[in-house]
């Protein structure tokens, strides 16, 4: 009996050691990469600018006003308010992991984070400013002037402001979600229901669009593949035309960038029109209008449980 107990104890020890060093799973989804190592002087400038309302025309609105890092990098309002206090056209997407998207904004109108900064600063409904004004304000601040000179040979310029903000945003990755840990081989970290939810996510075809390292953000798709979402919702708006507003191509009407599902449990409300206030509602809409399927009993609940495992960490703390 003693010998059997020793063998059993050794087996348990060996099993835990093997689990701790388990190989990554061969899955279509991949864990987030680590936060990149970038020039700390430039990143720090980007952090300050991200929180600086002087980027807006009337000194009332910063990037952080709408991209709240304590609210999943998004906003807790259906529509953020622009510099003039009026709501913008679409729901604010999260800034977390935005660096991994293949285009920026719901309609994908720009390719890079630098171009995204330009679009927001000069937008007549968001910050409403000009680069001449922004550069002048930043250059006249002695602290900024010194720190920009330390970080960039040519000091304060439009391009350097864009670059530092973009570099800061590149550090806003949220690795180490429970699902990432699962993908890396810690299969015990998910409950059986969460694992089954992931299986149903794949079997129903959700993974066809929500794919890649960002679990979305790498393709465009029509909203309403299997049904007329906008007719059923009513009250159509210009923003509902999606990518058509960018290209003028009829094939792009009501086409949007597929959003990342990372941290989706903490970024309600959902969709460009903020029409889904809960994750359960959002999944139901996807079943009806994107998949054209009726989920089996409890499958919506199971998929939601899986989606909640996608919440990552920021500076070592869960969002």
Image: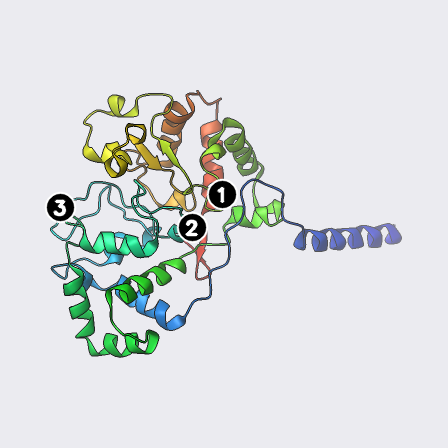
41 left or right of 200? left
Q: On residue 212, which mark appears? A: 1
Colour option used = rainbow
**Regarding mark 3 in the picture, which secondary structure is present there?**
loop
**Circle nearer the viewer, 3 or 1:** 1
Residue 250, which numbered label?
A: none
The picture places residue 43, in percent across and down from the top left corner, at: 36, 67
The image position of residue 16, as x and y in percent, is 70, 53
How would you rate the neighbour count of disc 2 (Cα within 10 Å): few for under 14, some for 14-19, many for 20 or more? many
Q: Position of residue 193 (x, y in %)?
A: 54, 35
Q: How many angstroms separate mark 2 from mark 1 (CA)?
A: 10 Å
Q: Is residue 173 above or below residue 244?
A: below
**Is label 2 in contact with label 1 (beta carbons under 8 Å)?**
yes
Q: Earlier in the sequence, mark 2 or mark 1?
A: 2
**Residue 100, numbered circle:** 2
Mark pair 3, 1: CA separation: 35 Å
Residue occupying the point 28% across, 74% down: 154
Identify the residue position indicated by label 3 in the image: 86
Q: Which residue is depicted at the point 63% across and 48% down?
A: 24
- Give the crowd class for mark 1: few <14, some 14-19, many >=20 residues within 10 Å: some
Horizontal and vertical percent position of residue 135: 19, 67
Q: In this view of the protein, which residue sits in the foreground, 70 or 43?
A: 43
- The answer to whether residue 258 is visible is yes
Q: Are marks 3 and 1 in contact (CB under 8 Å)?
A: no
Q: Which one is earlier in the sequence, the residue at label 3 or at label 1?
A: 3
| Front residue (pair 211, 174) | 211
Of badges 3 and 2, the one in the foreground is 2
Q: Is residue 274 visible?
A: no
Sooner in the amino-acid sequence: mark 3 or mark 2: 3
């Amino acid at each position: 009996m003693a010998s059997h107990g020793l063998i059993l104890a050794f087996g348990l020890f060996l099993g835990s050691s093997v689990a701790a060093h388990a190989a990554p799973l061969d899955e279509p989804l991949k864990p987030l990469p680590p936060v990149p190592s970038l020039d700390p002087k430039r990143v720090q400038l980007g952090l300050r600018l991200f929180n600086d309302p002087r980027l807006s025309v009337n000194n009332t609105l910063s990037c952080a006003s709408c991209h709240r890092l304590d609210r999943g990098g998004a906003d807790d309002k259906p529509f953020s308010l622009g510099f003039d206090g009026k709501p913008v056209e679409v729901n604010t997407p999260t800034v977390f992991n935005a660096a991994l998207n293949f285009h920026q904004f719901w309609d994908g109108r720009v390719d890079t984070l630098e171009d995204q900064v330009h679009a927001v600063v000069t937008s007549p409904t968001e910050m409403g400013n000009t680069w001449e004004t922004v550069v002048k304000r930043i250059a006249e601040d002695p602290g900024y002037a010194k720190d920009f000179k330390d970080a960039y040979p040519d000091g304060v310029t439009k391009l350097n402001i864009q670059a530092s903000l973009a570099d800061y945003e590149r550090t806003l990755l949220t690795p180490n979600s429970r699902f990432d840990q699962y993908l890396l081989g810690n299969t015990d970290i998910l409950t059986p229901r969460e694992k089954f939810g992931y299986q149903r996510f794949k079997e129903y075809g959700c993974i066809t669009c929500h794919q890649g390292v960002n679990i979305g953000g790498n393709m465009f798709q029509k909203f309403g593949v299997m049904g007329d979402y906008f007719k059923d919702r009513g009250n159509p708006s210009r923003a509902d035309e999606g990518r058509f507003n960018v290209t003028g191509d009829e094939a792009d009407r009501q086409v949007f960038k597929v959003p990342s599902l990372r941290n989706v449990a903490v970024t309600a409300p959902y969709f460009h029109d903020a029409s889904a206030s809960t994750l359960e509602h959002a999944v139901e809409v996807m079943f009806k209008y994107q998949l054209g399927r009726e989920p089996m009993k409890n499958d919506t609940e199971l998929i939601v449980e899986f989606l909640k495992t996608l919440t990552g960490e920021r500076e070592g703390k869960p969002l």
